[in-house]
Amino acid sequence: MGDSVTTNQPIEKRPRKQVEYNIILCSGPSCLHNKSSELYTEIVKQLEAFNCQSKVEIILSGCLGMCARGPIMVINPGYILYGDVGVNDVHDIIKGHIVDKTPFSQKVIHEDHLFNRFYRVFGDVKFFGKQMRIALRNCGIIDPEKIDDYLSVRGYEALAKVLTDYSPAEVIHQIQDSGLRGRGGAGFPTGLKWKLTADAEGEVKYVICNADEGDPGAFMDRSAIEGDPHSIIEGMLIGGYAVGAKKGFLYIRAEYPLAIKRLEKALTAAREQNFLGDNILGSNYSFDIEIRLGAGAFVCGEETALIQSIEGERGMPRPRPPYPSVRGLFDKPTLTNNVETWANIPVIILDGAKWFSTIGTKSSKGTKVFAVAGNVENTGLVEVPMGTTLREIIFDICGGIPGNRKFKALQTGGPSGGCLTEDSLDTQVDYESLAKAGSFMGSGGMIVMDDTTCMVNVARYFLEFTQNESCGKCTPCREGTKRMLEILTRITDGRGEVKDIEKLERLGAMISKASLCGLGRSAPNPVLSTLSKFRNEYEDHILHKKCTTGSCQAMLTYSINDQCIGCGACIRVCPVNAIKGIKRNPHTIDSELCIKCGECMKVCKFRAIDRV
């Protein structure tokens, strides 16, 4: 096929240790925070106590996605899932499942087959039932720090296939035929971006993985790297071959130490096995990857700002054109994709563009990973086929709103996205449908809000984030977002004026049109979308000086009613001595001294404190 090269070095697949059971223990950040490392020590101890350590192999995996139920433990065969596992549960799990061959039902989430080792997640568990894992196919299954584990699930086969069977042009054709679009937010056709870079003039070209994930509540890319770093490396290798690059950069923020550690181990192992370096797998293709650490600037998620940061400059956007595919890193043609995009590449090569293009909708192919956070039962990481509805994600997969509260809004697309209301819940997850509903896909952050949420305060929170993260290069973003934030702060403090709404709309429209980069142009979105859909809340704050949800503390007033028996509990917790009274007599709150912390209301057992 074309000008393909022949590999002379077969991929060595070393078999796993032959055991009766595999215990897969999540070692993602959420489970580590919940002391899964202590579970590992206890598992080893209990296996030794029951003299069955030779029967079991322990696999420390990445995130399985069920962050709300961590620490997570899976025992195979059967892939029986244990959740909320504590150190004191380990004895019963090992004795029951390994020794007595009866699962410890108190901690089992579900006993049927939950997933296989490749792409599809199966089972009756709602969290997994409607998911389809492609980018996250190995996360929660393999040990990300062992290259042999990656090889056991067809790792680097796609690279070998490309080097053996495809010319660079044929690889690009495969990616174009798959319909894959960039998962970093804009949704630009991936194959077209590759072709533009390949066609650009110049002998030196670069490949970049954008792992600078800065959206509040988003952890898709971090989890993919922590759970399966080799899939990103393999994707970059294939991309480098396709566009004619010999050097890649993986740009990741320094505040992701676990992801960086696993990337470094994966790169070292890949070099040792000749998947990176000179004459890869005996071919004439050479390619290597260098990690570059970012300082955590949100703007460096923007492609041109990221490139400036790699070059050692302050991360600030550049005007386009010229586009990075023509003139990018060090003024050379550069291909940039984000983590999730790269993770899809080996699957497309192995299983075919035609197969991949059957998943999703007409214009949005494949799956999408979302980090679901906020007021939802099962917070965590989900991957669904494009075309899945928001209602299915929130209520079927993630279990709905806790505490029997009512769904109020959903923020997609990160701090620059838009708020969607209940009438948008049946919107399909794809680029065009979300844009039509008033938001956008973004990199995959999804924050669910219930009826206790103040939408004015939410808009202020997101705008405060984007204003703090503005690089300051262009006046509309630097000054415009600052003025909008001042207005929103005034409104949430109870000092808003009727003309403030018109000012917010005018400023938002100006910033959206005049800012230099996409981050600046989208910064007003949370304000404009909440003004459109929750205008009544802005009017309540301005006209009636009232926050109906009680979220804006500056607008609250605390008072003591006639239910007070003078127990003194409120006096003891008030940090500013604003409550006065004699024991067994009704107390009073000095509104001038009160800082509205709400501690008195928390401790009062007699509902004697009103908040209005």
Image (cartoon, grey):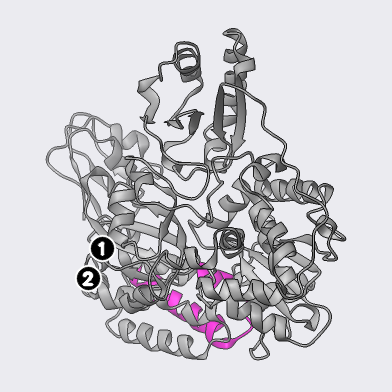
Q: Is residue 297 left or right of residue 183?
A: right
How many dots with numbers?
Answer: 2
Left or right of 473? Residue 541 is left
Residue named by callout 1: 547
Task: Report the disc number at residue 369.
Answer: none
Q: Residues within 10 Å of mark 1 (few under 14, many from 20)?
A: many
Element assignment for label 1: loop
Image quadrant holding the N terminus, namely: bottom right
Q: Which residue is drawn at 43% across and 65% down?
A: 461
Q: Give the range drawn in magenta.
A: 465-493
Question: x, y percentage for residue 116?
Answer: 48, 41
- What residue type is disc 1 on? Cys
- The residue at 61%/34% (across/down) is 60
> Neighbour class for label 2 at 10 Å: few (<14), some, many (≥20)?
some
Q: Are marks 2 and 1 in contact (CB under 8 Å)?
A: yes
Q: Is the magenta stretch mostly helix, strand or loop?
A: helix
Q: Which of 554 and 197 is in front in this view?
A: 197
Viewer-side residue, 375 vs 542: 375
Residue 488 lies in magenta, yes or no?
Answer: yes
> At label 2, which amino acid type do we have?
Asp
User: Mark 2: which secondary structure?
Assistant: helix
Residue positioned 34% across, 57% down in the render: 448
Examine the rendered structure and indicate whether residue 587 appears above or below residue 98: below
Q: Is residue 428 visible?
A: yes
